[in-house]
Amino acid sequence: MADIRNKKLIWYEGVKLLLLPTAVLAAYLLSFCVFLVVFPTYYKVYELPHAYISFDKFAETMLYIAFCVLMAVYVYRSFAYKKLYDKVRVSPYALFAVRLMWVTVFCAAATLLPLVCGTALEGIFKGIAPKRYAGFAYNPLFSLLNRNPLYCLFPLSVAMFGAVIAAAVSIVVNAVHWAQNPWLKIVQAVVWTIIVFLLVFTVMNIPYHRNDKMWGMEFFFSYPMPFEWFTYDDFMSYMRDTYTTLRFCAVSWRIDTWIGWFGTLAFVFMGFASTALFRGQINDDYVYVKPLKQKGKKENKEEKNHA
Amino acid sequence: MEQTTQQITQERAQQTAQTKLFGTLNVWKNYGSKQVLKGVNFSLPLGGIVGIFGLNGSGKTTLLKILSGLDGRYRGSVMKKDFDDVAYMSVEGGYPMDMRVKDIIRFFGKFCPQQNTEKILSSLSDAGIKEKNTLLALSSGMKQYLKFLLTVYSGASVCLFDEPFSNLDVNMREKIAKTLILESNGNRLFLITTHELKEVETLIDGFLILKDGRLSAYYVGEEVRETTGKSIAQFYKEKVNG
Amino acid sequence: MEFKSNETIASQIVTYVKKEIFGGRYAPGQKVLPIREFAAFCSVNPNTVAKVYAQLEEESLIYTDSTLGKFVNPDAKQIEQKRQQYLSAQMSAFRAELRKCGVREEEFIALAKQSMDE
């Protein structure tokens, strides 16, 4: 019976969690189709490359929005549905694992879609006005043309990032659930958000050797990645750099580093550990109790002997 | 009249060949420095309707939360022999307010495969509650009734009802009593906490009294009447104040 | 259904059913409600009703057909016999009460006639 329930949990939670974020993706796809048809028809050919860059930034914004919507739904469901899932005795570990799985799947899909569309768009626009593109310096986020094929791992990077954020959010949510006093809940929320943030910050600043040369990925990180982690210096250089847009502060896990993989797994583990720590034991003892001994009721023992 | 846990277990088990047991073993629970449950022990075979009575603040809801598995922070253990499923009708909310009635029923139906969805839907329509209502739109009595239906028709072997009669009018109370009677069988145990002693006077097989954090032995309803000549309500009132 | 508190529910229901049978409202051979439905009708615990039916079966007022359910004893003569037994037991108890008030035979018959006329 546990297998049937877990299957149902996977699909039920998947649909409920991803409905709104997928709507954002659908909006993006619609805009893409419209843009693809409308722009070349109605606008001057010389504007194509600039328009393409604008659309690339639009796609990036949509990705951020989809991700924020996903996290908002994730937090909402973590709070609003906790008692309900407890009542039907769904394991909190299974619930966390299912949600984590869907977050990573969605992040990968939400990156893959603009990547494919952006590549197609660039190809089409270049086909329409190849001369306009000659000499035009640009660095779009969502395009595979003229890139190292390993750029295809871009969705994986975002998926890992999604897993880390989901786990971090779950740590805070579990900490808040643990407190029973409303004031303590607020304290827990603030304290644990800071703790989680510091953990991420610390891990990211552990000096690491990039393995890109080992894996042939040295060209990989000359291309912009979303959710670019930046230290204060990076932040200032981004502010000064006119060709890159300002990305808001978030974590990026470089998949070419051991610390990136280790960090992701560590956060996922911490997500499960916080469930164990804050939810307490769920006592499911299947103990058959021998009939309690009673003073002066020795005849029952004799009955047992006869039976 | 006052049967120990051991006696009732053996007797009932012999009568009905019932191997399934439900109870606790030495459960202790405290909220901060306050000891709410002090070594609660009981063991009931499945098959019947049992009341748990106690004054306000005696720890009935706490005990039910522990029995249902919703509260994992206690010492001791909950004992379930030869079965697993426990359904719980709680006092406080616990449902997301954006869900509609049909969503909640579908949700429970998904995760409680033995749910009797048709009966739930027909009972709701008899009471005038529409499937497409959001939970916000229901009065507290209707929410209570919905919770009751979801619990009693869940198909679970043990159903715990925390104050099922509160907030309900006379007709609903009768409906609930009749539903409990029709749904009970030799393989199910219904545990009810309530202050409405008169409503459950004839409904229960027996009862336990929770006083000062300790659970009394099991009292058989009919024997109380026979030997003391008092109603369960009178007997309980004397016991809990004595 | 209202119940007194100083007698077991089972015995009160047994009395009720007996009165229904002896009063003719449950005809001989008539089907009676299954345990659970009768319990719902009386708003009492099904185990109590099970005891009631068990006692009535012991007294041969009701029998169980394994496939068709429970029925009132179809033997009208036997029921009449039981009815007479019941009535005379009630009568003896009543006479004992009246004797305590000093009622003798003539007064008793006069009181009986009076109550029949009412």
Image (tube, rainbow, N blue to C red):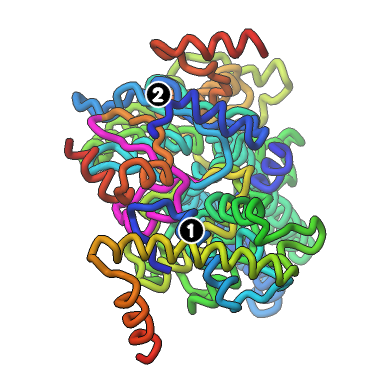
Instruction: Tell me residue A27's x, y (percent).
Output: 60, 66
Residue of label 1: C44
Q: Chain of mark 2?
A: A
Is label 2 on the same chain as label 1? no
B115 over A203 or under it: above or below: below
The image quadrant of residue B223 is: top left
In which quadrant is the N terminus of chain A drawn? top right
Query: Which residue is nearer to you in this view: C48 or A46?
Result: C48
Residue of label 2: A199
Tag 2 and tag 1, C-beta contact below 8 Å: no
Which kind of residue does numbered mark 2 sit on?
Leu
Instruction: Tell me residue B6's x, y (percent).
Output: 49, 23
Instruction: Tell me residue C49's x, y (percent).
Output: 56, 55
A174 over A67 or under it: above or below: above
Q: Secondary structure at mark 2?
A: helix
Relative horizontal placement of residue B4, taking residue A142 as reference (left or right): left
* First to last magenta residue range: B190-212
Relative horizontal placement of residue B148, taking residue A157 as reference (left or right): left
Question: How far is disc 2 from disc 1 in space, using C-alphas?
Answer: 62 Å
Question: Is residue C68 among what the camera can see?
Answer: yes
B237 over C2 or under it: above or below: above
A306 over A72 or under it: above or below: above
Inspect the magenta stretch and tell me whether residue B154 lies in it.
Answer: no
Question: Is residue A247 among what the camera can see?
Answer: no
